Image: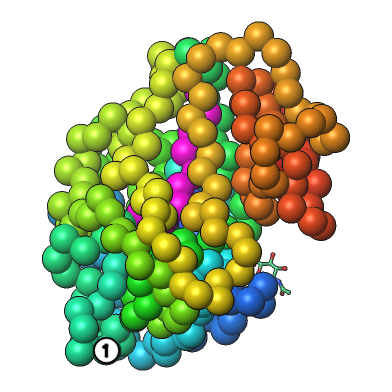
Amino acid sequence: MKSFSILAAVAALATQASAHYVWPQLIVGGTNTSSWQYVRQTNNWQDLNPLTDVTSTDVRCYDSAQSGTASTVTVAAGSKVGFTVSGNPANLYHAGVLNVYMAKAPSGTDVANWDGSGTVWFKVYQISAVTDGGSTITFPTTGMSEITFTIPAATPSGQYLIRTEHIAIHSASYFGGAQFYIACAQVEVTNGGSGTPGPLVAFPGAYTGNEPGILINIYYPIPATYTQPGPAVWSGSGSAGTSSPATTTAVTTVKTTTTVATTTSTSKTGSSTGGTVAQYGQCGGQGYTGATSCVSPFNCKATNQYYSQCL
Ligand SMILES: *[C@@H]1O[C@H](CO)[C@@H](O)[C@H](O)[C@H]1NC(C)=O
Ligand SMILES: [Cu+2]
């Protein structure tokens, strides 16, 4: 049935195309700003296609074919920002992991005119995969229509690029198969602290494409562990600015579970091990040992046996 197989192939292509996505809006003060207002318009703003060459300078902000007219928005250190996802469907549909990096523009350089070159990028947030020794691998970013994180209170004042990156690894078992969905926003951090962000990496340079978390078959055999690409999330150590919000927690990092747990912990009201979890942060799941209370008004909801998050 030739016609059938052609139809099936076309349908498969269409499905694949519609499953791509971009990051057009920065979320500031809990509000979605306009598309490409503070986020640099990316080359894929219309076709939504991913970047796959991690050695390209486009791995920085994927904006080489655009004219770069984004504005710069002021955000306080210690405050929350985020990015929305646009596409069809408008969420992080592919199995994948998330990293958010920041880089400070050299003094005297307007971030709007800066390309983000140099060994200047530090990681402020990540959402990894969840493994349990080889039975399952799950991807907590799946279905997220936005991501939010806290700019570490110890981040020094100044102008920064904030680079979000979803690495889709649903077809990453061959070199170049991983799909990078990237965007950079321009911000001016005020009321900053005295921290020294790091470890620092360069783009390109941070990845070769051969990392175990990028060149990976997630289906067979099911990976026993998952190694998040890139450097460690900056601890956010250092003093905060003088009038920062009370919360100085740098980021809520989703733990990569590598051991098979014997108990299920998805309780909403159980005693917290200290602190509350931010929106989208992990608050439960088999093997999870962190805080289980969500910051108001969010509640801890089980995504699956291994992962509960504050929604
Ligand atoms: C902000 O954008 C996200 C992602 O598209 C969407 O889910 C949310 O409803 C938007 N919020 C508002 C207030 O429009
Ligand atoms: Cu896709």
Q: Is residue 283 left or right of residue 190?
A: right
Q: Which x, y percent locates residue 94? A: 51, 44
Disc 1 beta carbon < 8 A from ligand 1? no
- In the picture of the structure, the residue carrying the numbered disc 1 is 110
Residue shown at 67%/27% (left/top)?
A: 285
Residue 128 among magenta residues: yes
Q: Which x, y percent locates residue 158? A: 34, 80
Residue shown at 50%/75% (left/top)?
A: 242
Residue shown at 35%/67% (left/top)?
A: 194
Q: Provide the residue span drawn in magenta.
A: 123-131
Q: Nearer the viewer, residue 302 or 149?
A: 149
Q: Which x, y percent locates residue 215? A: 28, 33
Q: Is residue 208 left or right of residue 296?
A: left
Residue shown at 47%/72% (left/top)?
A: 241
Q: Amino acid at mark 1?
A: Asp
Q: Is residue 276 above or below residue 84?
A: above
